[in-house]
Image: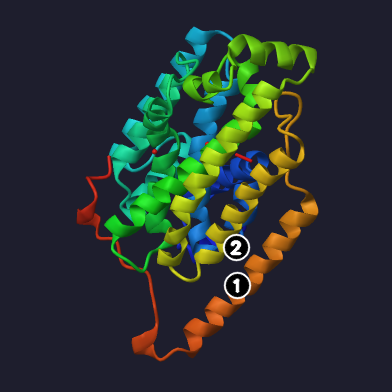
Amino acid sequence: MTARELDAAGITDPGLRHAYAHCRTLNARHGKTYFLATRLLPAHRRPAVHALYGFARWADDIVDTGPPDPLARTAALEQLSMSLRHGLDARRSAEPVVHALADTARRYAIDARHFHDFMAAMRADLTVTDYATYADLRRYMHGSAAVIGLQMVPVLGIVAPREEAEPYAAALGVAFQLTNFLRDVGEDLDRGRIYVPADLLGAHGVDRELLRWSRDTGRRDTRITRALRAFEELTRGVYRQAVPGIALLDPVSRPCIRSAFVLYSGILDAVADDGYSVLHRRAVVPRRRRTVVALDGLARIAHARISHRSAPPAARTGPVPVRAEAAAPVCRGAA
């Protein structure tokens, strides 16, 4: 993390600066889309975003690429849960990622329930291998995705009541994760998990055995293609639910989220353009496309800042402050 970002955020303690820098490294290494979009935020807001996503990435890594022994993964995740509880209570931790997260939670009065709900979803990933219906998947995604959007609301700033903005933020978190699920069908299958609901697959004549056959042989089946296309359509519907929320954000934060929105929905385009071959290879948004989106975001930032400076003081739109008492006492995925 650059010293400018830390200085802008008022983070002066050397231990905290190291903790936030560690989170930024995690975000840069694992989340190219998130990291690129985050660079479009005002400098003082970036450290908090890196803390939130750094922690999410760390927990996800334990579940997906941690110790090969299931008991060891469970123990590692429980150790992280314990560090989280203690860190939020004490507002500091010896673990750098938890230390930065606890500081971000305090600064932005983020409801501690969001972090605990996230950890519950991570624990589910240790034992749950599929979901019978979309309703079942949505219950899981409340903790794994929706709460990430809710955590981001006070960091990004809003120009509407919090209760109006939060459903859109939650929907966008879910849309991003559904996109990951579609892109990563093959990789998740290798881990023993299927996130595409069984009833959606079954409606097209697809089951685990057929997916495994396709993955192992490299051969395609039209039934799988139809099922994945239906899952793509479902995901696009969630994006449509989320898009009105962008206008409720602080104007200087909108280019960041709009860019993430465009880049992530672009993954759906890449999957479709590749013929839904996600069981055989990962679809990616071309670098040129990412560059164009980033440049558009920079142009929008410049426009937002000029508009804000030129507007008369009474007409300027600023974020609605989030009161600490609006949250419970502060006691936590990428492309």
**Which quarter of the picture shows residue 100?**
top left
Image height of 61 relative to 213, above or below: below
Query: Who is closer to the viewer here, 94 or 259?
Result: 259
Residue 51 seen by the camera: no
Residue 226: x and y, percent?
A: 64, 29
Residue 30: x and y, percent?
A: 64, 38
Number of residues whose C-alpha sits closer than 10 Å to that of mark 1, classed few (under 14), some (14–19) or many (20 or more): some
Q: Residue at x 34, y 33 (%)?
A: 117
Q: Residue at x 51, y 9 (%)?
A: 70
Give left or right: position of 146 versus 41.
Answer: left
Gap between marks 2 and 1 measured at Cα: 10 Å
Give left or right: position of 290 versus 10.
Answer: right
Q: Residue at x 42, y 59 (%)?
A: 245
Q: Residue at x 58, y 72 (%)?
A: 301
- Residue ID for mark 2: 40
Query: Who is closer to the viewer here, 238 or 189?
Result: 238
Number of residues whose C-alpha sits closer than 10 Å to that of mark 2, classed few (under 14), some (14–19) or many (20 or more): many
Task: Point out the frontmost of discs 2 and 1.
Answer: 1
Under circle 2, the secondary element is loop
Residue 159: x and y, percent?
A: 36, 69
- Residue ID for mark 1: 300
